[in-house]
Image (cartoon, helix red, strand yellow):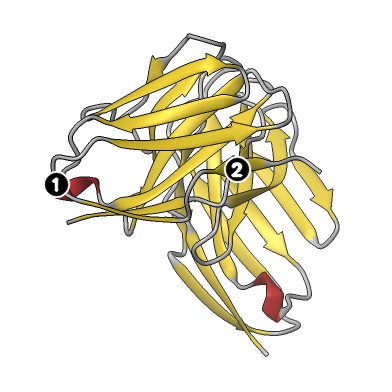
């Protein structure tokens, strides 16, 4: 039961540019999370935004959540080659249900 | 530093073999999860556990079973491996069922 859908599927940018990835989901949520996965490795948690929050920042990351549109965006500012990875959004319908992950956006940052 | 470890990074097994994938976390988390990840399909939840000896089916439990005898360890068992179980298997743990998850490095299983 795939809940989140990331867009675009793949993104290629130059170092120093900003990268924006979007996530849309279908049902109401308790929270939405973003994860990063380097090739062939496990996922790393980046940021969690709750349903009553609209925006959150962590370093070069900015996440927004629009519950009326059932969508979220992840902005990475001043991207670096080391940001090259796949990025996944994951949603939780309630505090007692497990996360449902999207299929991810593959980001390539070219030096 | 928090840590989730998985018993093998790469594993090759034959069709029909019984396969055990082990996951250990050192964060005293109540919840543990097993996913498989396939190209174009993203992460799919196989089973999760919210307490010792407790287990819940995820989206694709068929062909798998799990065991959680101790809080820190969650095992995934393929009773009779088949080629369609060739995949990357990821283990994760968290404090709450819907909280942020810590992932292990993954086991890439090939069934021939």
Q: Which residue is mark 1?
A: B15
In the rendered image, the quadrant that contains the N terminus of chain A is top left
Residue drawn at x 49%, y 18% is B68
Is A95 above or below relative to B75?
Answer: above
Specify the subunit that label 2 lies on: B
Does B32 appear above or below A76?
above
Question: Disc 2 and disc 1: Cα gap in Å?
Answer: 26 Å
Q: Secondary structure at mark 1?
A: loop
Q: Residue at x 56, y 26 (%)?
A: B73
Residue A18 coordinates in the image, percent (x, y)? 71, 73
Residue A86 or residue B106, whichever sits in front: B106
Q: Is residue A13 visible?
A: yes
Residue shown at 22% from the left, 27% from the top: B62
- Few, some or many residues within 10 Å of mark 2 (<14, 14–19, 20+): some
What x and y, as percent, mark residue A102? Answer: 45, 46
Q: Which residue is mark 2?
A: B5
Residue B106's x, y, as percent? 49, 50
Judge from the rendering whether residue B103 lies leftward or rightward of residue A48; answer left or right.
left
Which of these two is toward me, A88 or B10?
B10
Which SS class for mark 2?
strand
Q: A82 or A1: which is nearer to us?
A: A82
Image mark for residue A94? none
Q: Residue at x 58, y 45 (%)?
A: B104
């Amino acid at each position: 039961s795939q809940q989140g859908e990331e867009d675009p599927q793949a993104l290629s940018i130059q170092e120093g540019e900003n990268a924006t990835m979007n996530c849309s989901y279908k049902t109401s949520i308790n929270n939405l999370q973003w994860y990063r996965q380097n090739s062939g490795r496990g996922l790393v948690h980046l940021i969690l935004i709750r349903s009553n929050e609209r925006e959150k920042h962590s370093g070069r990351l900015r996440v927004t959540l629009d519950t009326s549109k059932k969508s979220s965006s992840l902005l990475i500012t001043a991207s670096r080659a080391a940001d090259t990875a796949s990025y996944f959004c994951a949603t939780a319908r309630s505090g007692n249900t497990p996360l449902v992950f999207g299929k991810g956006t593959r980001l390539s940052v070219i030096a | 530093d928090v840590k989730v470890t998985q018993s093998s990074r790469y594993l090759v097994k034959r069709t029909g073999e019984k396969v055990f994938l082990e996951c250990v976390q050192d964060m005293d988390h109540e919840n543990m999860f097993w996913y498989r990840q396939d190209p174009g399909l993203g992460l799919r939840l196989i089973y999760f556990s919210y307490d010792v000896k407790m287990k819940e089916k995820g989206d694709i439990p068929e062909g798998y079973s799990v065991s959680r005898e101790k809080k820190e360890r969650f095992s995934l068992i393929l009773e009779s491996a088949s080629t369609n179980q060739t995949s990357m298997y990821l283990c994760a743990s968290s404090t709450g069922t819907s909280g942020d998850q810590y992932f292990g490095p993954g086991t890439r299983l090939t069934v021939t």
